Amino acid sequence: MKRFLLVDDHIVVRSGIKGLLSEIYKPAEIDEAGDGDSAVEKLKHATYDLMMMDIQMPNTDTLGLMEFIHIKYPSIKVLIFSMSSEKIYAKRFMKAGAKGFISKEAPLEEIKKAINLILNERMYISESLASALAEESFSNVSSNPFDKLSAREFEIVSLLLLGHTVSDISKSLNLQVSTVGTHKARLLEKLGVTNILELKELAVSFNL
């Protein structure tokens, strides 16, 4: 019997994937979590064949969570299942230990393919990502300016793009306002932009 953990703050999304998994894998045991803390609690008490996780969840540093799971529970396979841009996030999360990254807008057959590949000890990489990785390997330079950012800078830029203020981010990440301000200034410099409007335009150009 296969055992799955669905980590997503949207109940409707969890219900849809739960129905899909129940249909494909009979019998299957499927647990759910709405954020990082509840996911970690589930992992403490059960072993899963596959964990499907969204990126954007409240009060959750998902990249940090991915790195924690990879170190603490290395046998658990994780498939990132998100509306967030594959071009921006996939490489970073797979480097942190995820076995694949797929869009919530992907066709049903592609989602099934991703799940089956990972359950069979393989990785899932979409055709578009494979093409981008091949192009980068030949040029030896990442075409994505967001790849220049550190993990913390990337976390902060994601929150800025969601409309969070420096004050909001300091509370969310338990950092000093001045520290967040320093990170913000540094990431804007790395990306070659001077304000949030330009940052958003750059993000849109890379489908963030």
Image (cartoon, helix red, strand yellow):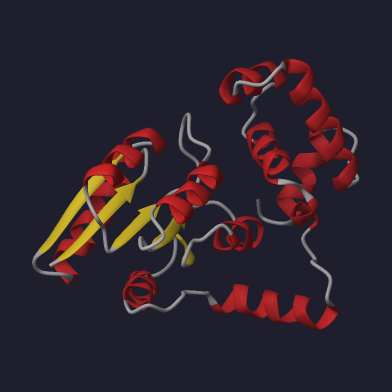
- Residue 25, given in percent of the width and then of the height, sits at 16, 70
Residue 185 position by quadrant: top right
- Residue 86, given in percent of the width and then of the height, sits at 59, 61
- Residue 183 or 72: which is nearer the viewer? 72
Image quadrant containing the N terminus: bottom left
Q: Is residue 102 visible?
A: yes
As drawn, is 115 to the left or to the right of 128?
left
Q: Residue furthest left?
A: 27
As drawn, is 127 to the left or to the right of 19?
right
Number of numbered labels in the structure image: 0
Q: Is residue 82 visible?
A: no
Question: Vertical placement of 97 versus 66: above or below?
Answer: below
- Residue 161, given in percent of the width and then of the height, sits at 67, 36
Residue at (60% x, 17% y) in the render? 171
Residue at (69% x, 32% y) in the render? 160
Question: Vertical placement of 205 versus 185: above or below?
Answer: below
Q: Residue furthest front?
A: 72
As drawn, is 47 to the left or to the right of 80?
left
- Residue 107, given in percent of the width and then of the height, sits at 39, 70
- Residue 16 or 55: which is nearer the viewer? 55
Question: Vertical placement of 87 versus 109: above or below?
Answer: above
Residue 206 position by quadrant: bottom right
Residue at (55% x, 51% y) in the render? 84
